[in-house]
Each structure stands twice: as structure tokens, then as C-alpha cells.
Image (spheres, grey):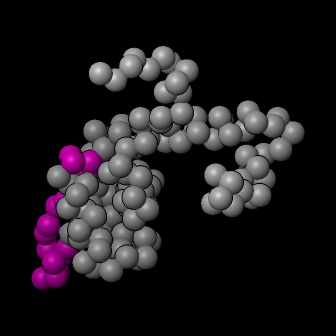
């Protein structure tokens, strides 16, 4: 039987670091869509995130399955167009994720009030982490 974890023991578990969002490409896609609330065309999103067609398609599929993005396919001037938009639920989940990241930064910044968190991280090597 696993012993109960006291609040201080699980303090740095950061349960809000959503594994779906935490992947670099999906974080980029969601950031683009949050900052463009009317949505972006597939090719524009691909360029902004520096992804290939296949890679972006796969990440959008994951996000759509999670209910975080909506994909609308249509045509303009006889050319296929795919519009990608963040959903209300996706935006809320993204903002909760960012809130957790902010807590991570605050926790690191508490180590030294004289130094910004970025300078604290510079001296760390994988063996010191």
C-alpha cells in the first residue's frame, strides 16, 4: 500500500503540465491559434510553426481528438482550404497549462530574489539537475 503524500511532498509534481500540450510542436500550434482567434489556414500555420504537412497533420489530429482544435475544410477559388481554430475548451486548457508553467518559473525564481530565473538555469548541467 502506497503511503499518503502530504501536500509538501507533491509540491513540485506540476500535474497541470498537460502531456498533450507539452510537446514542442503542439505548444507552437496552440500558441499560434490562441494568438489568432479567427483561426489560421493550414499552410500559414505550417509556416509559422516550421512543420511539414505530415507533421502538422498528425499534431492537429491529436489536438482535434482532444477537442482542443476545430478543423474546417472548404474551398476558395477551386482550391482546397483547411482552416484551423482553437476551441473554447482548448483555449481554457491551454491557459491552465500556462498557469502551471508560470508556477514553475515562480518556484525557480524563489531560489534567489536577486537573479532572474533564466540566469539561475544557465549554470545547470544535466548532471546537476
**Which residue corresponds to the image point at 65% horizontal and 58% vertical from the top-left?**
127
In this view of the protein, can residue 85 be seen by the observer? yes
Q: Is residue 26 above or below residue 49?
A: above
Position of 35 compared to 129: left or right?
A: left
Residue 78 included in the magenta stretch of the image: yes
Number of marks in picture: 0
| Extreme-front residue of the structure | 1
* x and y percentages locating residue 107 in the rendered image: 65, 34
Is residue 120 found inside the magenta-colored segment of the image? no
- Residue depicted at x 35% and y 39%: 93
Instruction: Say left or right for 30 vs 9.
Output: left
Q: Is residue 26 left or right of residue 122?
A: left
Q: Residue at x 87, y 39 (%)?
A: 114
Most common SS among magenta residues: strand
Q: Say above or below: 69 vs 94.
A: below
Instruction: Report the residue at 76% width, 36% height from top.
Output: 111
Q: Which residues are magenta?
A: 66-81
Residue 5 position (above or below residue 86):
above
Does residue 111 sit above or below 4 in this rendering? below
Q: Nearer the viewer, residue 98 or 74?
A: 98
Residue 32 visible in the snapshot:
no
Question: At which x and y percent is residue 73?
Answer: 14, 66
Amino acid at each position: 500500500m502506497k503511503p499518503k503524500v502530504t501536500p509538501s511532498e507533491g509540491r513540485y509534481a506540476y500535474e497541470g503540465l498537460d502531456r498533450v500540450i507539452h510537446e514542442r510542436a503542439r505548444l507552437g500550434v496552440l500558441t499560434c491559434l490562441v494568438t489568432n482567434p479567427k483561426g489560421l489556414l493550414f499552410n500559414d500555420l505550417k509556416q509559422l510553426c516550421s512543420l511539414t504537412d505530415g507533421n502538422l497533420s498528425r499534431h492537429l489530429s491529436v489536438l482535434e481528438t482532444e477537442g482542443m482544435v476545430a478543423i474546417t475544410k472548404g474551398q476558395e477559388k477551386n482550391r482546397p482550404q483547411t482552416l484551423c481554430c482553437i476551441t473554447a475548451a482548448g483555449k481554457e486548457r491551454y491557459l491552465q497549462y500556462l498557469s502551471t508553467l508560470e508556477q514553475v518559473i515562480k518556484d525557480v525564481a524563489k531560489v534567489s530574489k536577486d537573479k532572474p530565473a533564466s540566469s539561475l538555469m544557465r549554470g545547470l548541467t544535466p548532471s546537476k539537475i
